[in-house]
Structures are given as structure tokens and as C-alpha cells.
Image: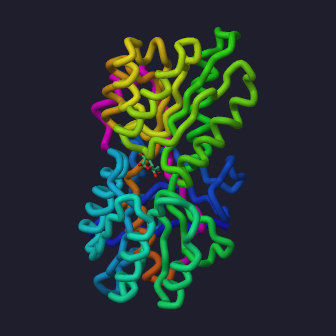
Amino acid sequence: MRTVLKRLPLRLHSCLLVFLVLLGGCSDSANPNVQQAVPSPDRSPALLSGLLPSEEVVPAKQLVLGFSQLGSESAWREANTASIREAAEEAGITLRLGNAEQDQQKQFEAIRSFIRDKVDVIAVAPVVQTGWEPILLEIRQAGIPVIIVDRSVNVEDSSLYVTFIGSDFYQEGVKAAKYVIDKMRHHPEAIRIAELQGTVGSTPSIDRGRGFRKLMEERPNLRITMSAPADFTQSGGREVMRTFLQQPEEKWPRVLFSHNDDMAIGAVEAIREAGLVPGKDIIIVSVDGTRRAFEQMVAGNINAVVECNPLLGPLLMQAAAEIMAGRTLPKRMVTPEDIYTQELAAMEVANRKY
Ligand code: GZL
């Protein structure tokens, strides 16, 4: 059984195309119930007309949504915030947004203010997976429904939230690994791989790393020999890559797997400082698919980028409206994503919406 999202209020003139995955948690592999949707050419969560029943969802009153955004650490995050602000405006939903600057305690403080103000729905982009049970229980006691956005939470009782809207990060790691395996297929010798991890304890960092390592098991000559967190920031990527390249030259990596574009762009700076050519001396694969990363691919500095779609605003507003209309939602909603290589970058760069 899958729940199809209804059309948004007329103001939005749209409906969304999503993978509806009826899973309890984040999918590690394709689920037989997944309804494969054909992503639209614009790569954002597609807004296709006519796909869903014409029944309208019109909020009974001005819906107030409290959203705890985890930070502003990367271009992806800025695009995610912009998408949510724009979609709330378009949907006529009052948005209360708190930016926690990657501090979980500040997320808790923002959520408690939403509870005090008796908002209709609370959405959370959790900076890390753990530590959410107590605050979710407080929200439940206040009788306010919760939507988890972008990253997931580790809780025993998944009824503490209505739905989790976010990417399949494990598959993003698998896609990055498949690219590396293919790119290095003519190199039977030992290949050292460096990894720039995102925020420690965050779903994207944990699951991208797991997906990548799972595929690497197939190629014993491809080994991760250096790995460290760089917190998804450009400065973090530059500093950690500098330390990697302070190792003796014979230990330098041939491949870099970066958990996001900002860290990869920072690493490009450090690679150049060391007198190496990024994209040639060190093959770089990254995740997010920001315009900046596409520009780096066109320049030859980054070799491939796995898409991770931040444009979750329309889906979040649709889910909030559905909840207020008393409808049920699937526990897991995943947006369509792809991988792009240098060869495709020049054609695609102008289409990037973030
Ligand atoms: C992924 C998101 C990650 C991005 C980073 O959904 O949580 O956080 O990959 C961002 O760019 O900082």
C-alpha cells in the first residue's frame, strides 16, 4: 500500500513526483515497493501536473510551521533553506525558521519555542542522528505532529514522527564507489583513497561512508588509507586535505571521495598548493551536485558529482498540508537523484537550480 500525495492548494498549481518508500528507516537498498518515478528534466523534485487525483488540499486555516534548520555550513544547506522559505511563501504557510548553526542544543531551544507558541506542525533537519528521543516526546506531549527533513534520527519508536523526507545517502555512497571502480578499472595496482567525512554522527556522513565501503569490498586494490571529518565546510576540506598531503609523498592518495562539494572545493585548493593537478593527479568524486561543483568539473578539477537534492521545500509544505488535512503519509519519502561526470557537466551546469 502506498499513500499518494494529493495536489497542493491551487496557489501552488502543482503536485509532486516522489519515490514513496514504505520503510521504517533509511533505505540501504532498493525496496520492492518503491514506485520508480521518472525524474523530470529539471532534476528538482518534479512538479508534474495530472499525475495525481484532482482532489484539492486546502488548509483549514493559515498553517504555522516551525522549522529547526541545522545550520548554514554549505551551499547545499543554503539552497535547502531557500527552497523551504520559497515553498512556504508560495503555499501561504507561515514559517518560523530557527538556524542552529550545527548546534543540537540550539535545535532543542528552537523546538521548545515552537511548542510554547503552539505551532501547527514542527519540522526538523537533525544535525546528528542521536539524542532526539526526549525532545520528540516533549513535542508528542504537546500534541504537535513532526516531520523529519533531510537527515534522519535514531529513535526506537518511529511513531514519534509522521514522515522522513530525505535522500538515500547509502545509495549516494554506492554511486560514488561505482564511479571510482569504473574510473580505476585499468589500474590493478594498489590505489590509495582519501575520504573527507561530513559532520560526525550525521546520517549523510555515516551512510555515504557505508555505501562507499560496501562497494570497495569488491576491489581489494582500492583502499581507503586516509579518512577524517571536515564538517561539510570548504575550509574544513582545505585544512584536512592539507594534513593528508603533509604525509610522505609515497602515501599521497590517488583518489579523493568527499562527502560534499564544499569540502571537495576546499580540497582542490590544498591539492594545487601541493603542486598537484586536481582531477588528474588526484581523481575527485563528490556529493551534492551544486552549481559550484559543476563549474569545477567543467574546469577539470573535479571528476564526478553524485546528486543530493536540497530542493525539499515543496515536498515539506505538501506534507504539512496533508497532515493538517488529516491524511496519512508514508514513513519515508525519497527524491530522485543522479550522478554527473565531467563529460556531462558543460551541458548541465546552466540547468542547476542550486
Ligand atoms: C545532505 C545534507 C548534507 C549535504 C551537505 O542531505 O544533509 O549537509 O551533503 C550539507 O552539503 O552540509
Q: Left of 46 or right of it: where is 229? A: right
* Quadrant occupied by the N terminus: bottom right
Q: Quadrant of residue 115?
A: bottom left
Q: Is residue 333 magenta?
A: yes
Q: Position of residue 61 (x, y in %)?
A: 31, 86
Does residue 66 appear anywhere in the picture? yes
Does residue 10 appear anywhere in the picture? no
Identity of the residue drawn at 42% across and 32% down: 264
Of the pair 236 and 115, the residue shown nearer to us = 236
Of the pair 43 and 250, the residue shown nearer to us = 250
Identity of the residue drawn at 36% across and 31% down: 265
Q: Position of residue 145 (x, y in %)?
A: 49, 81
Q: Position of residue 16 (x, y in %)?
A: 43, 58
Up-down relation of residue 263 to residue 95 (above or below): above
Q: Quadrant of residue 103?
A: bottom left
Bounds of the magenta segment: 328-354
Identity of the residue drawn at 36% across and 32% down: 266
Up-down relation of residue 349 to residue 164 (above or below): above
Q: Quadrant of residue 349?
A: top left
* Colouring mode (rainbow / by chain / secondary structure / one colour): rainbow
Q: Left of 257 or right of it: where is 190? A: right
